[in-house]
Image (cartoon, helix red, strand yellow):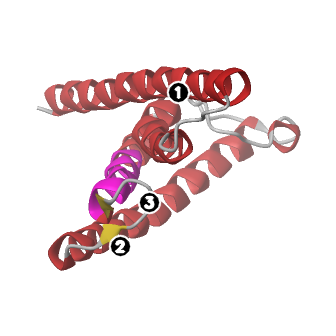
Amino acid sequence: MIERTNKILDGVINFFAVIAGILLATMALIVTYNVIMRYFVNRPPVWAIETTEYIMVYATFLAAAWVLRHDGHVKIDIILVMLSKKNQYALSVLVCFLGIVACGLLAWYGMKATYSLYTREVVMMKMTPWPKWILIAPIPIGILLTFIQFIRKFFDLLARKDVTE
């Protein structure tokens, strides 16, 4: 049961990471198009900057759990290498626990905020008017997946038997 759940979660996390990658490639194309139109035609598209802002939010949060699973988030290695293996392990457990708490709170409040924006039908009044909940929905989704990944990592750490001085 746990293996099947982990496989499903990995599939969801991978799916969102692929979506994030596609969005980043799209963003690069939009920026290139914007530069060409601005400097060679002198007619930049009015939608380009706003669209890349939204893409950046989506890509960042949809890929966060995948980055965590691959241990790709920034950490201060200079401090870690000075610690013993046992203290590195203890710090990793603490960081995972804090990640669980922080992501759990952020996911909860993010979902509440998104639902509130949805029910109140709040619209972002920019160049392209969009329902605001659509623009912030990837935040609680990505944070929820990161919360789940922190839990998985936490239990993987606790199950380790190779922690010695």
Point out residue 39 in the picture as x, y percentages from the top left corner: 73, 26
Magenta-colored span: 133-147
Is residue 134 found inside the magenta-colored segment of the image? Answer: yes
Which residue is labeled 2 in the image? Answer: 109
Query: In the image, which is nearer the foreground, mark 1 or mark 3?
Result: 1
Among numbered discs 1 and 3, the one appearing first in the sequence: 1
The answer to which quarter of the image holds residue 77 is top right
Residue 103's disc is: 3
Q: Position of residue 140 (x, y in %)?
A: 35, 57
Looking at the picture, which amino acid does disc 3 mark? Cys
Query: What amino acid is found at the position of numbered circle 2 in the picture?
Result: Tyr
Circle nearer the viewer, 3 or 2: 2
Dot 2: element: helix
- SS assignment at label 1: helix
Residue behind mark 1 = 30
Image position of 137 with respect to 112: above or below: above
Q: Nearer the viewer, residue 106 or 19?
A: 19
Question: Toward the viewer: 25 or 89?
Answer: 25
Tag nearer the camera, 2 or 1: 1
Nearer to the camera, 7 or 137? 137
Q: Earlier in the sequence, mark 3 or mark 2?
A: 3
